[in-house]
Amino acid sequence: MIFHGMFTCFFVGVCLATVVSDLDSAVISVRKVGE
């Protein structure tokens, strides 16, 4: 059960990291367009 919880945390962390990096890319694109 502990391993399952660790796997879930890892999976969620990867998903969050992907979403954050996508948002960062979008923000950078918007800033470049705005300049």
Image: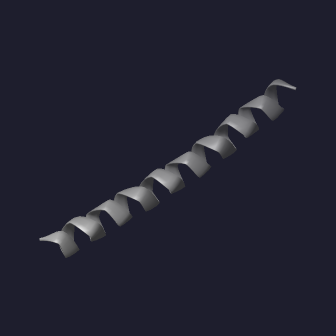
Q: Position of residue 31 (x, y in %)?
A: 21, 65
Q: Residue at the far left: name it.
A: 35
- Residue at position x 31%, y 61% from top? 27
Q: Residue at the far right: name it.
A: 1
Q: Quadrant of residue 2?
A: top right
Q: Is residue 4 left or right of residue 25?
A: right
**2 or 9: nearer the eye?**
9
As drawn, 9 above or below 30:
above
**3 or 12: nearer the eye?**
12
Q: Is residue 28 left or right of residue 4?
A: left
Q: Is residue 10 left or right of residue 34?
A: right
- Residue at position x 68%, y 45% from top? 11
Q: Quadrant of residue 1?
A: top right
Q: Residue at the far top: name it.
A: 2
As drawn, 26 above or below 16:
below
Q: Quadrant of residue 30?
A: bottom left
Q: Position of residue 14 (x, y in %)?
A: 59, 48
Q: Residue at the far front: name it.
A: 34
Q: How is the image coloured?
A: one colour
Quadrant for the C terminus, please: bottom left
Q: Is residue 18 left or right of residue 2?
A: left
- Residue at position x 45%, y 61% from top? 22
Number of marks present in the image shown: 0
As drawn, 5 above or below 21:
above
Q: Position of residue 15 (x, y in %)?
A: 60, 51
